[in-house]
Amino acid sequence: MDWEIKLFKEQVDLATVAQMAEATFGDYVKGVVDIEQQILGLGGELHSDIEDALLRQGSTQQDLWGINVHPSEAWPNMVEFDSLINIRPRQNNRSRDVEDPSLREQILRLIERIVRR
């Protein structure tokens, strides 16, 4: 398994994301988005590994949300909102899902901008 974590502010093509998925979990790659700095982090064994990489480069905890990207799925189903780092009672998010529809939309727009399909 290749647990390298890559941070993207600029575009990355879907083929690269698919390669990262193949190198990690086969059909998906874990990701964390920074909705404030507009960064997509991909790779790693755990969402918390990507979260840590983003925090070390200056991200703020409250702006980070965990996802999974399934590159072989159609848009927007390729984005799965499921991560332990999303459990945040203080931010009114009490599950592994991203519960706020407007926040989900922000995350989808960020991924749509960065991942070139």
Image (cartoon, grey):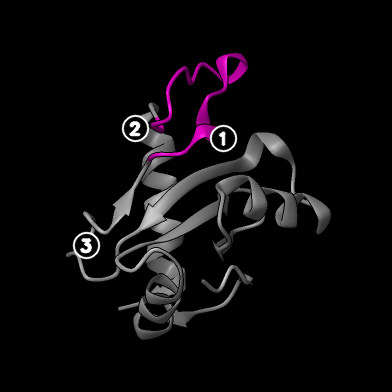
Type of amino acid under label 3: Trp
Type of amino acid under label 2: Pro
- Specify which label sits upstream in the sequence, 1 or 3: 3
In the image as oriented, which residue stretches furthest toward the left?
74
Residue 10, quarter of the rendered image: bottom right
Please name the residue that numbered disc 2 is placed on: 101
Please name the residue that numbered disc 1 is placed on: 85
Dot 2: what SS?
helix
Magenta stretch, residue numbers: 82-98
Please name the residue that numbered disc 3 is placed on: 75
Q: CA distance from mark 1 to mark 2?
A: 18 Å
Quick check: marks 1 and 3 in contact, CB under 8 Å? no
* Closer-to-camera residue (15/46): 46
Which residue is painted at 39% across and 53% down in the image? 68
Q: Residue 59, image x and y in percent?
A: 75, 49
Q: For marks 3 and 2, give the one nearer the viewer.
A: 3
Q: How many marks?
A: 3
